[in-house]
Amino acid sequence: MSSTFLLALPLVFVLSGVVLYAVLAGADLGAGLWQLFAGRGRHGEEIRDYAHHSMAPVWEANHVWLIFVLTVFWTAYPTAFGSIASTLAIPFFLAGIGIVFRGAAYALRVGASTPRELGVIDTIFSLSSILTPFALGAMVGAIATGRVPVGNAAGARFSSWLSATSILVGVLAVATSAYLAAVYLAADAARRDECRLERAFRARALGAGVAAGALALAGIFAFRYEAHSLYNELVSGRALPAVVVSALAGLTTLALVYRRRFEAARYSAALAVAAVVAGWGLAQWPAILPGLDIRQAAAPHDTLVAVVVAVLGGGAIVFPSLALLFRLTLAGRFDPGRAAQAATPAHGLPEARPALLVRTAVACLIVGFGLLTIANAAWAHAVGVTALLAFVVAGFLALAPTEES
Amino acid sequence: MIRVLADGLMPVHQQYLLQARQMQALSFAVHIPLVAFGISFPAMVLFAEARWLRTGDELYRTLARRWTRILVALFAVGVITGTILSFEMGLLWPNFTATFGGVFGLGFAIEGFSFFLEAIFIGIYVYGWDRLSPRTHFLSGIPIVLTGFTGSLMVISVNAWMNHPGGFTLRGGKVVDVRQWQALFANTYLWHELVHMYVAGYIVSGFVLAGAYAFGRLRGRWGRYERTALAIPLTVAALAAPVQVLIGDWAARDVARAQPVKLAAIEGLAQTTRGAPEYLLGWYEHGRIRFGLEIPHGLSLLAFHSWDAEVQGLDVVPSAERPPVNVVRFSFQTMVGIGTLLALLGVVFVAVRIRRRRLPESRWFYGALVAAGPLSVVALIAGWVTTEVGRQPWVVYRVMPTADAVTGASGIPVGYTVLALVYVVVGVGVSWVLRRLARAPLELEEAAR
């Protein structure tokens, strides 16, 4: 039997992934919302462009947190995943459609040249940026209010995720995204000395922050009517410290934004979101779904160990790479107009000798054919395939696909 | 028949099972060509950049920069279509995931990290042009090439497991004793699938790109830039296409051993036969091939490299456990037919290149290249139809029927229609942006840097 620690560790990974998706990709989605409300004219266009360029280098990496959440969840808690995805198929599908349009808009913006084209693309992007966090938030609301039973599409198709509380959580997700985006964009604008943009996003951050705080408060009381035990944990039980931390971090962020200390505000805003998710997890513990606690939901012992090993190993490679990406982005190295260095390449690497390459390629082809096609042993196939791939590489270099005149 | 119950969710009757399968197939068909670019195109971009670093010739720099813009657009679309596929694991097949997530899920979890690195370094590479030192910039592209490979390895390890499951025990309908490293990576079925797809990636992007520049040549765009841009992808594809014939032959031999029913469907072989003949073209009806071109002993020779080898027919399983023969057979023949033509085209190119040390000059060659681009995509999709439809009616081969995996949610036809419409819109958008990028004049590109 697995220890509680091992049972819960993948859940901690999943919830951490949810937090990171919310604070990173959430901000990308929020930027889309601000593009929609940027207004007309020169200033509006400036805001839209800026919101796009700020997010473009990082959106794909941020999006991967959602994939991380899904894959770890379905590996470690397969029954819960199947139940949630089948009962909440509609909001899940809507979130997917939103993501499709959002990603497509990033791809298409490269080719747009007139303001009208940009306008169409940005509007699609913005609408999908609202749809996705709302749908994902409503799914969280449905799970938290215990409306997803165990089973293949065993829950209600609409009322599961369209209860007052679920809608409220969905709207909260949209507001939080908008808030985070405004804080990050204000910070970026301050770094680039863009006073007008800084002012614009500071005002938006304050407004969205107040709205998100009010919605979070309303959300807690909505749980009182739809999920009373969860409510009790939130206001007086295990989850209370998380609620307090979240409230304090939220207020601190507002104060920091007000005083234009945007860099610090980035982190306290993220902390506020993290505390909300942690509070959710603590309040629901140990139930994943009604009648399905963590012990029943978890995959076999060896699977959990494998997941933990994979996440720790993967994290050891991914986190330094992420740190590099964010350091380059936050240091402004990717800002437009920072084109630097008259790039002068290094010369003088010796060219490989074509005759030798040709001979290597031919030898590889013969060896590959013999070992893969004629021989039958597994090792022979392995060597044969390698030789054939080496043939392609050597042949490519030998043919030197360069047109000199 | 072994049935899996209890540990996952209860199987339900789903009226729209076929639509669910079609929706899944549509999602794959849209995603897989983008994957082909994802695994191979970065290496070509890096080759162009390496030429620039080595020679200082600005032409290569322009080429690498322009290709980067295509790369970033295709990668973005690949990200979202791939996300839809991961959603469909739950949206369409919740019971598959609920029952076996603990066995195969690890492959996707590791793929998630591979995808992470890919996305991170794509961000750095794309936005790092002119902002990082040339050498650092080049190095930042290498992880993209490597993760293209590891990503395919992980996803295909899951597909190979579905086709050739192992690494778990069924006890009383429950999945117990899970050995997932063995299930995913000690699977003999993995390697031919992986190599076949990886090489296909280079063939598809090579011929598609070469086809686009060949189209330009027919319209008179044929400067040094265009010739270089054609030569790089075409050389890769021309060498990879003949090699793919050998790899495909290896794959077929593995299928013959591990999935005899799939092979029987591919060949339309109703009865188990010694020295089985091979039929080219034709149509499977009432247990035999009509109007096909017979090659005596051909199938035994191809599948087992032996004149009189016994080849199992469809009759080894009850008819309810057979895949739809003509779909599988037609897609297989499509793949093999196109693959053979592409290999011949490749051999012609390599021969001209070696003997004349220049690009071919005949007009028919460029006409053929224009056709080769889309045909290679067709072959890619046909290959996946062969393996996936050939696996039916099982989602986990001979363990879980697809009908037991499907969702009980209603509204599959609605979801299918919406997704199809969305993909049409995305497809129109992508072709619009690719044409835009192709038309942007070279000088403009340089001025905007």
Image: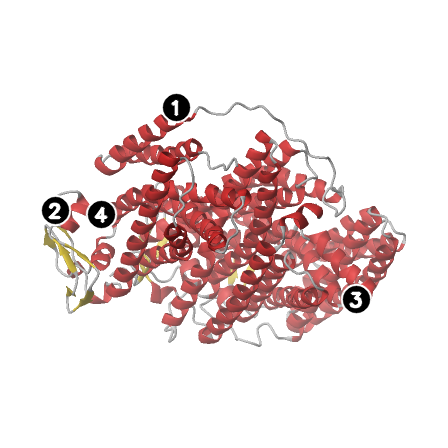
Q: Nearer the viewer, residue B261 or B368?
A: B368
Label 3: which residue? A211
Check disc 4 and report its element: helix, strand or loop. helix
Check disc 2 and report its element: helix, strand or loop. loop
Determine the CA span between mark 1 and mark 4.
39 Å
State how many labels appear.
Answer: 4
Label 2 is placed on what type of residue? Ala
Label 4: which residue? B257
Residue at screen point 82% across, 63% down: A42
Relative side of B291 to B227, left or right = left
Label 1 is placed on what type of residue? Leu
Q: Nearer the viewer, mark 2 or mark 4?
A: 2
Label 2: which residue? B309
Q: Nearer the viewer, mark 1 or mark 4?
A: 1
From this view, report whether residue B363 is shown above or below residue A218: above
Mark 1, residues whose alpha carbon is within 10 Å: few (<14), some, or many (≥20)?
few
Disc 2 is attached to a residue of which chain? B
Residue at screen point 35% across, 62% down: B5
From this view, report whether residue B191 is shown above or below residue B394: above
Residue at screen point 78% across, 60% down: A47
Q: Are marks 2 and 4 on the same chain?
A: yes
Determine the CA span between mark 2 and mark 3.
74 Å
Label 4 is placed on what type of residue? Arg
Mark 3, residues whose alpha carbon is within 10 Å: few (<14), some, or many (≥20)?
some
